Amino acid sequence: MMIAIINYEAGNLASVSNALKRLNEPHIITNNPDELNDSDGIIFPGVGHAEPAMASLKKNSLDQWLKKTNKPVLGICLGMQLLYESSEEGDSEGLGIIPGRLRKFDSSKEKVPHMGWNTFTDVDDSHPLVSSFNTSEYFYYVHSYFAPVNKYTLASCCYIQDFTAVVSKDNYMGAQFHPEKSGKAGALLLQNFLSYVHSGSE
């Protein structure tokens, strides 16, 4: 089995790769659609600004590949946000896979970005990605924009207001926090995703 980390100009590739190495998970880092097609599961990382990230995806037609794939996909941070329809950040469009528009936190109420460790306020433990979690584990966040809570939300978090921390629709999943920087809890979430991929490829 092989995991592919999508290589585009907005990806935090090294830290995600190192996290998979710690889990002894074979993986490649690629922007080649043929190599993505040969992989069993996809990790879609991201840091930075939504608009140039989308431009980078389009340059290699990775946006179209992501929209069409039926492979398990895990978006991380900006990678999760790009699964949505649009963002207030530069009024940029997303991939449109998950309904909703990213909003900016209100900086008149708290410091923005939301940066540091936080817990879930609510978890739908029926989904294998988050089945082993409750509201006691801490995850590491760095973001100024947030996804609204909707019917695809698996776990919510509160900073200024409730927002989506983990999302899932069909074969697409996403985490707003950085599991690769979230210690044992983050490693467990990545392991849950890998187990989900393994179970479908057997």
Image (tube, rainbow, N blue to C red):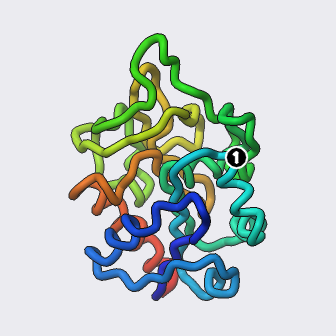
Element under disc 1 = helix
Residue at horizontal 58%, vertical 79%?
Answer: 30
Q: Is residue 149 left or right of residue 90?
A: left
Q: Position of residue 7 (x, y in %)?
A: 57, 71
Judge left or right: residue 83 versus residue 154.
right
Residue type pointed to by label 1: Glu
Query: Can I make out residue 8 in this image?
Result: yes
Provide residue 75's location: percent of width, then percent of height. 53, 57
Residue carrying label 1: 51
Residue 101 showing in the rendered view: no
Residue plotted at (41% across, 60% down) = 128
**Which residue is at a point 29% across and 61% down the rendered structure image?**
188
Give coordinates of residue 105: x percent, y percent.
52, 24
Of residue 10 and residue 148, the one placed in the foreground of this image is 10
55 versus 64 height, above or below:
above
Q: Quadrant of residue 56?
A: bottom right
Labels in figure, total? 1
Q: Residues within 10 Å of mark 1 (few under 14, many from 20)?
A: some
Residue extending furthest toward the top: 108
* Residue 152 left/right relative to 13: right
